[in-house]
Image: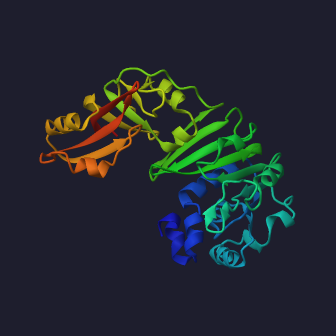
Amino acid sequence: IQKFGNFANRMLFSRESLEMATRLEISSHHATRFVSAGVSSILDAGCGIGGDSLAFAGAGLEVVAVESNEVIAALAAFNLQPFENARVENANVTEIDLSESDALWFDPSRRDGVKRSRNHQDWEPPLSWILEQTSDRSSGIKLAPGTDRKIIPTDREAQWVSFKGETLQMILWSGNAARSGVARSALVLKESGGTEIVGPHDSPDEPSGPLSEFLHEPDGAVIRARLIGDLARTHGANMIDSQIAYITSASPIESALVQSFQVLDYCPYSTKNIRELVRGANLRTLEIKKRGIDLDPAKLRRTLPLDGQEHGTLILTRLEGVKTAILARRAN
């Protein structure tokens, strides 16, 4: 199973617990943060099948993994068996002593039956209780990437994490696990490693301007962290529209924080204009991306002349308020 690499061969899962578990590439990042914070022991509250605990134990931390579900706790105990520095407790974390560990890691249950609950006071344990326990400790709280930003405390580092282009989680870091002066961060992980952008707060967007030679789509983690403006300023780029998360520049951006496209041609958005744009490009395959325009890409593709030899990308969006079709090719 891809989430756990070589560990998967000797692990036990349930369908739901596997779905909720953290990928090894991401849990290794969590462990590194705690090791860098100088902690030697950690309590993993809501450990599930032990995804994060595996990384914590593998990094040499003493791990107490707590899980309230008896069956899932048994799976976690089996999965953590190879590590003498890890043990599992089947307990409600609100009823145990949290003071014995240097650091705390929380992954609260956000489901009400089979559905996710948006009310953070209905989580198990409630977010208010978790924030109280972690206010003066080296801690991390794993939340969904789309969690309401209004509940992010001003004294925490909020970090959005993506893997292979999918934004998977948002972490609230505190204590020594948080970084001084960093309130927002976006970490983009790929198999080749990680790239990050950080900021002291949400960054103001750059003003919008004309489309230049290259168009760039920031990674979802950068968008969620609201660091698009800082990213644009770092690379001499500007927004293409005040409401659209694309930036443009005269030069390519060699960074995992963006997908870059070389602009070939563009025209006002209409079905007729798009067909003419594609007909003159000798295309055999066409990737269609949209942002700010509501349409069905598959339905549109069936109407386009794709009998050539080349591959292209059609980006349907708005340029300074005007619906526009952009023909491009990938630059990274």
- Percent position of residue 191, x then y: 45, 53
Query: Residue 243, relative to residue 97: is it above or below?
Result: above
- Percent position of residue 126, x then y: 77, 57
Between 294 and 225, the one nearer to me in the picture: 294
Query: Residue 76, relative to residue 327: is it above or below?
Result: below
Query: Residue 43, relative to residue 331: is it above or below?
Result: below
Which residue is at a point 23% across and 37% down the rendered structure image? 274
- Percent position of residue 319, x then y: 37, 27
Between 58 and 104, the one nearer to me in the picture: 104
Between 38 and 29, the one nearer to me in the picture: 29
Q: How many marks?
A: 0
Asked if residue 287 lies left or right of residue 103, the reply is: left
Q: Is residue 290 visible?
A: yes
- Percent position of residue 64, x then y: 76, 66
Q: Quadrant of the C terminus?
A: top left
Which residue is at a point 76% across and 38% down the rendered structure image? 155
